[in-house]
Image (spheres, grey):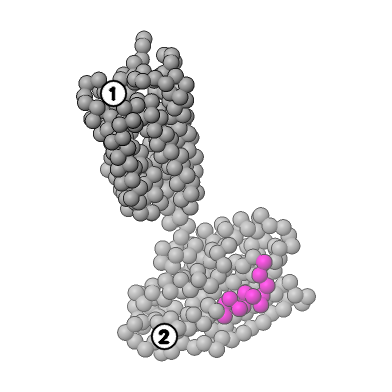
Amino acid sequence: MTLDTPTLLIALAAAEFASALILLAFLVSLKKANRATRLAFAIYAPAMFLVACGTVLVAFRSEVSAFWSITFANALVLLGFALRPEAIAVFYGRPVRGWMLLAALSGWLVICLVPDFFGSFSIRLIFVQAMLLAAAMYSVWRVFRLNAEHLSSVRLFTIGSFLEASAYLMTIGSQLIYQHESLKVFANPIQPLAYLVLLMVAIVIVSASFVAMAIERIQVRFEKQALTDSLTGLANRRAFIKAAERWFSSTNQTQAFTLILIDIDHFKSINDQFGHTAGDRVLASFGTAMKSIFPRAIPPGRIGGEEFAVLLPQTEKADAVHLLGRLREVISQCAICPKSDVSGITVSAGLITATTSQDFEEAFDHADQLLYKAKKTGRNRHVALDKTAPSDELTIVNSPNQPRGLVATS
């Protein structure tokens, strides 16, 4: 069976239409995706529809005028392919570069006004295929450059894009060698079939990978939510302990660390006097302060109602106490209730500095005991134990910061 070029293009257009419908159907079903993801699909689906319409018009070259089958048809194809990297940018929260779309469209329309260009099938074909090749490679560059979320499905997108690029390179190479002056571009029957298979497989892979990227993003977001305390933005207890244990298991036995457990003093009093909304506001402010002060190597966590934890690898006691002092200074300015004169909160803390010769659970229990001691001896202070010192140095330090207007009820 002979596979003529119009038949090939109609088959290709069918795959492109199917791709557009799949992307559109997925857009309609995106209930849990963020706005950037939905907008990206709202761009990508019409982009593939434009490409499909342009491909159909090219297939009917012998049935319609040159304007519709050459100028307008290729303008649709080029515009559709120019929209794809923009959809990728939007997917990652970047704005659409309208000037690039305008340049691609107007550039083609202007160059079609040049008689030598418009009258040469060979030059037109090579130009269009080169533009499609550039768009495919640009899409790959953008998807990798913007992939701050490290989505693994990006690799599938890359495979599809390289298959697509291979088809364009094959067309350009064939035209450069044989210099055909009609739609019968290929020198033997195998080449059109290879071109068709490559492009159809590429379209399926690229479209499917874009869907996979959206699904993976939703999955990552849910996983992150499952490991994040929604009120403070800190790691929750499970996430903090998991990260800490991972660090303990990956380091050697001589690595020093400081573990700090922190408890907001008289938090029940805040809830009792000002309501739970004020309490939530204090917790949110406290979380913000912790994220701004403590290093992110191991994210600080909220491990209980008003209890927090920080693991500081390669940190001596003096440095950890300094960071704790900065936290005290910031939260001392915290407004508990905007409608009252009460401001400033204090904390009690237990610090242990040790090496990874003891496991995390043992260090956590020690820090918890030190925190209990700080609370029992008057609060608004920290108790620190340095097990790296020759004699297991224990210190109790009161804070000069005092809350203003808060009456303790617990």
Name the residue that disc number 1 marks: 59
Residue 103 as seen in the image, left or right of residue 152:
left
Quick check: 84 above or below 264?
above
Query: Residue 58, how many percent across, how many down?
Result: 29, 26
Viewer-nearest residue: 160 or 280: 160
Q: Position of residue 219 (x, y in %)?
A: 42, 48
Q: Amino acid at mark 2?
A: Ser
Q: Which residues are magenta?
A: 314-325
Residue 96: image x %, image y %?
34, 51
When asked about the image quadrant of residue 82, the answer is: top left
Q: Earlier in the sequence, mark 1 or mark 2?
A: 1
Residue visible at 23% across and 30% down in the picture: 68
Mark 2 highlights which residue? Answer: 343
Q: Is residue 184 visible?
A: yes
Neighbour class for label 1 at 10 Å: few (<14), some, many (≥20)? many
* Residue 320: image location, x then y, percent: 62, 74
Q: Residue furthest right?
A: 390
Q: Nearer the viewer, residue 215 or 355?
A: 215
Amino acid type, residue under disc 1 in the picture: Ala
Could you tell me which secondary element the residue under label 1 belongs to?
Answer: helix
Mark 2 residue element: loop
Q: Residue at x 39, y 49 (%)?
A: 89
Q: Is residue 27 above or below residue 276?
A: above
Q: Would residue 34 be seen by someone viewing this image from the given angle? A: no
